[in-house]
Image: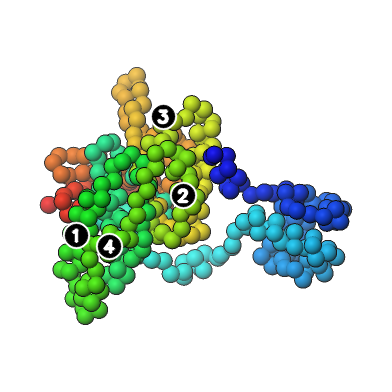
Amino acid sequence: RIQILFEDYVPMLSIRSFPLSSSAVKELSSANIDDVVDIVHYLPWQETPHSLNEANLKDAYGFSNETKQCLNSCLKAWKIPNFKTCEEVLKSKQPPPIVTFSMQLDALLGGGVQPHEFLEVIGQPGSGCTNLCLQIAASSTIPRIFGGHETKVLILDCNGNCIPQRINEILSYTLAHLNTIASTSEEKTAVSSLSVESMASCISIARCTDYKQLFAAIQLLSGYGVVIIDSLATHFRHEFTDMRYRARVLALLGNKLHEMCHTHGVTVIATNQVMVVPNPNQSSLQPCLGDSWSHIPHRRLYLKEESGDNYTARLLKSPDTPLKSASFRISRRGIRDCV
């Protein structure tokens, strides 16, 4: 049941949710501690949860070992974040962006798909969303010596559009490109050990037929550097009759995706569908899932089909790049620049 998944997201804040003896309960009650929030408020101003340890808990408050262990467990369950200065964040080494094989599209995204972020790709059917996701999946398997991530990719296929034959086709042209640009002996050695089969073995596909399977897959996944959801809106447009319940599920899903990005260093790409919004003057197309969802992704990219194989990408949301547009094309090779 999805309710079981909810319990994994909501920390057990109450002290009484932990197995405690009557003496420990009495000790905590005498200190007016009922939940995890009270623990932090009870600490002296010079103490922080990160500097709190077994010794100063016992010495400062005279708590028994059992109560002291309970308090430490509560603080861990609350998932108190680590604090870093801006200087520390700027000096931390970040992996390079994931290239899309279109220089214009990469420039629009600030060099490519930014690592450890949540990118939402929006578009109508046939606008190139799935092809862009498959190109990102292929690019994620590029060896580090070429500036790639060389990581495992998980594609959560919600609408059945992920075709393995198309992935292999894009991988074959990606490998051919690496053979073309390999110049040093190290690069040539790295390419010689690659094959379409070895690159394809780094990409996993899971078919999610409802939102519960999607939730379970996200909750249980591990060991993947890139997670692609195509399409996120599939199970949220028609499977819910209670809109408040749907909003809660979406909020929990958004929190989990953010946790994957910031805590586990996963790059998340999700596609979204569009819907017609009636207007007295002229109806318009808007992304699905509502305005509240628009605050969740770090970047939002709107794709539109133009003429022939040419497409336009318009950046709707970005924390550090101008909201502009770029053109690209989709060919048998994958995503490329317009000729």
For mark 2, give the secondary structure.
Answer: helix
Q: Earlier in the sequence, mark 4 or mark 2?
A: 4
* Tag in front: 4 or 3: 4
Q: Earlier in the sequence, mark 1 or mark 4?
A: 1
Q: Earlier in the sequence, mark 1 or mark 3?
A: 1
Which of the pair 202/122 is nearer the observer?
202
Q: Mark 1 packing: few (<14 Cα in 10 Å), some, or many (20+)?
A: some
Look at the image and tell me whether residue 106 can be seen. no
Q: Earlier in the sequence, mark 4 or mark 3?
A: 4
Going by the numbered disc 4, the residue's amino acid type is Met
In the rendered image, the vertical position of residue 226 relative to residue 96, given as above or below: above
Residue that badge 1 annotates: 172
Image marks 1 and 2: residues in contact by CB distance under 8 Å: no
Residue that badge 4 annotates: 199
Residue that badge 2 annotates: 218
Look at the image and tell me whether residue 292 can be seen. yes
Residue that badge 3 annotates: 238
Q: Position of residue 174 (x, y in %)?
A: 21, 61
Kindly indicate the quadrant of the structure image that contains residue 209: top left
Which of the pair 168/182 is nearer the observer?
168
Q: Position of residue 58 (x, y in %)?
A: 81, 67
In the rendered image, the vertical position of residue 260 relative to residue 240, given as above or below: below
Going by the numbered disc 3, the residue's amino acid type is His
For mark 4, give the secondary structure.
Answer: helix
Image marks 4 and 3: residues in contact by CB distance under 8 Å: no
Q: Mark 3 packing: few (<14 Cα in 10 Å), some, or many (20+)?
A: few
